[in-house]
Image (cartoon, helix red, strand yellow):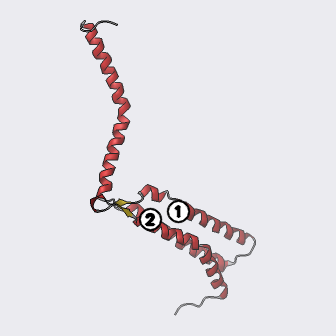
Amino acid sequence: MAKEMSTEQWEYEMLFDEKFHLVEDELLWLETDVKLEKGGWIFKSHLYSTKELLESPRIHRIYSISEKIGDDVRHWAANDSLGKVGYDVYGRKRSQVNKKLRAIQNKIEERKPYKWEIIVSIFDDASNVIMRLMPTVGKLLKLAIKLIDSELKTQKLLPKS
C-alpha cells in the first residue's frame, strides 16, 4: 500500500514538477536528437555527432534552468520559505533529472557509428594528416630544389646566376 502524501508534500510535488517541466522537455528533445539519422542504405549517418550532442545548446539549457531552480531553492531556504519536505522533494526531482541526463549522455558516448560515418572519419583523419604535413613537405621540396640547384651549378650543368 502506497504511503499517502500530505497536502504540503503534494504542493511541493506540483511546484517542482512545474519548475522542472522545461528541463524534462529539453531532456526529451535531447534524447530525440540522439536518435535522428540522415541518409539511407550504406550512406546512413547520425544527424548530430557525439561532440555536437555533448556540447549542444540543449545541455546548456538543462544546466541553466536547473541552476536557476537551485538558486530559487537556496533563496527560499535562506528566507525560511522552504521546509524539509520541500527540500526533500526538490532533492528527489533534481536527482531524477541528473539521472536522466547521465543516462542520455551515456547513450551519446556509447552510440555506435554507422559504416558511412567510419568511412568519412577515415578520410577526414587522412586529410587532416596531409594538411598538417603540407608545410613540412613544402619545406623539404624547397630544400631539395636548393640542393639540386647547387649540385647542378657545382657540376656546371646550370649557369651561375
How many numbered markers are drawn?
A: 2
Res 155 → quadrant? top left
Mark 1 and mark 2: span between their CA atoms?
10 Å
Horizontal relation, residue 122 to residue 67: left or right: left
- Give the residue type at disc 2: Asp
The image shows residue 109 at horizontal and vertical percentages of 41, 60
Residue found 70% across the figure and 76% down from its top = 82
The image shows residue 133 at horizontal and vertical percentages of 35, 34
CB-based contact (under 8 Å), mark 1 and mark 2:
yes
- Nearer the observer, 76 or 160: 160
Res 86 → quadrant? bottom right
| Mark 1 / mark 2, whichever is N-terminal | 2
Residue found 31% across the figure and 46% down from its top = 123
Give residue 33's mark: 2
- Nearer the observer, 36 or 146: 36
The image shows residue 43 at horizontal and vertical percentages of 30, 58
Res 17 → quadrant? bottom right
The image shows residue 1 at horizontal and vertical percentages of 52, 93
Task: Say above or below: 9 vs 120.
Answer: below
Residue occupying the far bottom of the picture: 1
Residue found 61% across the figure and 74% down from its top = 90
Q: Secondary structure at mark 2?
A: helix
The residue that label 1 is drawn on is: 58
- Give the residue type at disc 1: Arg
